[in-house]
Image (cartoon, helix red, strand yellow):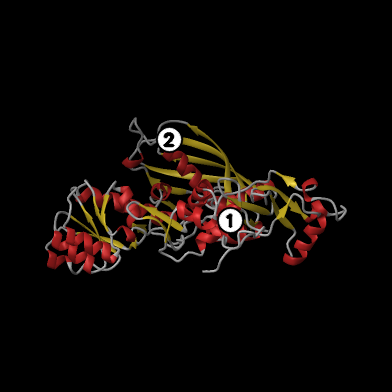
Amino acid sequence: METIEPGDEALTKHEYILQYIRQLKIGEKISVRSIAKALQVSEGTAYRALKEAEKLGIVSTRERIGTVRIEKKQRSQPDRLTFAEIAALLDGQVLGGASGLDKTLQKFVIGAMKLEEMIAYIDADSLLIVGNREDAHHYALEEGAGVLITGGFDTSDEVKRLSDERGLPVISCKHDTFTVASIINRAMYDRIIQRKIMRIEDIVAFEDKPKALHASDTVNSFGLLQQETGQARFPVVDEKSRIIGIMTARDAAGNPGSQTVEKLMTRNPITVRPSTTITSAAHTMASEGIDLLPIVDRQRRLLAVVTRQEVLAAMPFAGKQPQSGETFDDLMWSGFAKITGERTGEGWLYRGRMTPQMSGPLGTVSEGVLMSLLMQAGRLLIWEIGKRDHVLESVTTYFVRPTQIDQDISIVPRLLEMNRKSAKLEIEIVDDRGLAAKAMMSAQMIDPY
């Protein structure tokens, strides 16, 4: 392993410890005490750095194992649950194979059949859900599958030994098989839906330290960094790598080379977290007129930067990821269809049926459902006419009278005004008795240039 010299002034103690952890071999155990001893830092400093490493996904702490260096997980397959997440969801007890808790499973198999019939379904990276059947536990482990024992049952020492040897978890929980399957299926379905949501961490690499200035740097320092990178704006950080400002070429223009960045920078810049959605970042940059967003952790330490160009390049894909899961909005809108050839002014007409699932506490259609339908129709109209991404700014809704379930309704969105920056619409819901609800909606258009 490459050594890190404690005297390296370019690294803070925190960065120094994180770099040390990154150089450990995958699977190597690590502790607060071992870090403190190896790097000659206090245990408090080591503890804080180890917690940060866990948030970054480069170490994992598990019961009965301790803290281990792991491969950083990517979000490429967010629908895959790990055995650790299954154990947490079900409040389960890990009986063996704890070293494999970070492994993901591709499918789960319910063992409600004879062993010879199960054999066709059990394979590597699957999870067998079964009761007190040690022959099935043993076979699943031999085939590379984990085991979830329902009903709170234990298993034999031989099965536990095999699970430890193969690094395949055996988990026991108190729930029955049906409840377990329902909980896991719901969790996997939620993960599938998440594939539709693109976040900042999906388009930014966090491995390389971003170029940044310090408050004591000068305009000359800014110029040298600009020549080196070809960029025109940089984050400004303090001695602990916390973001304190943004310095741009416009700030530097006309000032002497000896002038410090601290006197010229824009203070308290807007920042985002890695989990911020692409759509939210695009809205922030468009509404605030900024071209660079610093990405920070909870302590506002700089992790990376993202440009407006990068965010807008990702926008066409932000809400259009292939998926098989449906959100509540998708489910409500699934019964509606655009009626071709029927258009009023700059509006369109959608027709659909109010189902019993849409009812509220009084037996009529829920006001929340009606609002969702009004907004969905408005969004579709904006996209069809403007071919632009947008974010909702405001909606004012009027409910004229209750809407009954088990009847067909029409939704009519009409465009009042649209320009490069905004759009305004009115949307009506009409049933067999006439106007039932109406909304005035405004949206901010996201400029692609």
Residue on which disc 2 sits: 367
Residue 394 visible here: yes
Q: Quadrant of residue 359?
A: top left
Q: Return the x and y of residue 17 as percentages of the image width and height.
A: 54, 56
Q: Give whichever of 130, 400 is nearer the camera.
A: 130
Pointers 1 and 2 in contact (C-beta within 8 Å):
no
Local packing at callout 1 (Cα closer than 10 Å; few below 14, some 14-19, many 20+) is: some
Tell me the kind of residue under disc 1. Answer: Glu
Instruction: Look at the picture and state if 49 lies above or below 76.
Output: above
Kindly identify the residue that appears in the image at 70 percent across and 49 percent down: 289
Kindly identify the residue that appears in the image at 77 percent across and 47 percent down: 262
| Residue 135 left/right relative to 89 | left
Classify mark 1: helix, strand or loop. helix
Residue 418 visible here: no
| Residue 314 left/right relative to 153 | right
Residue on which disc 1 sits: 15
Disc 1 or 2, which lies upstream in sequence? 1
Q: Give whichever of 176, 225 is nearer the camera.
A: 225
| Residue 436 left/right relative to 298 | left
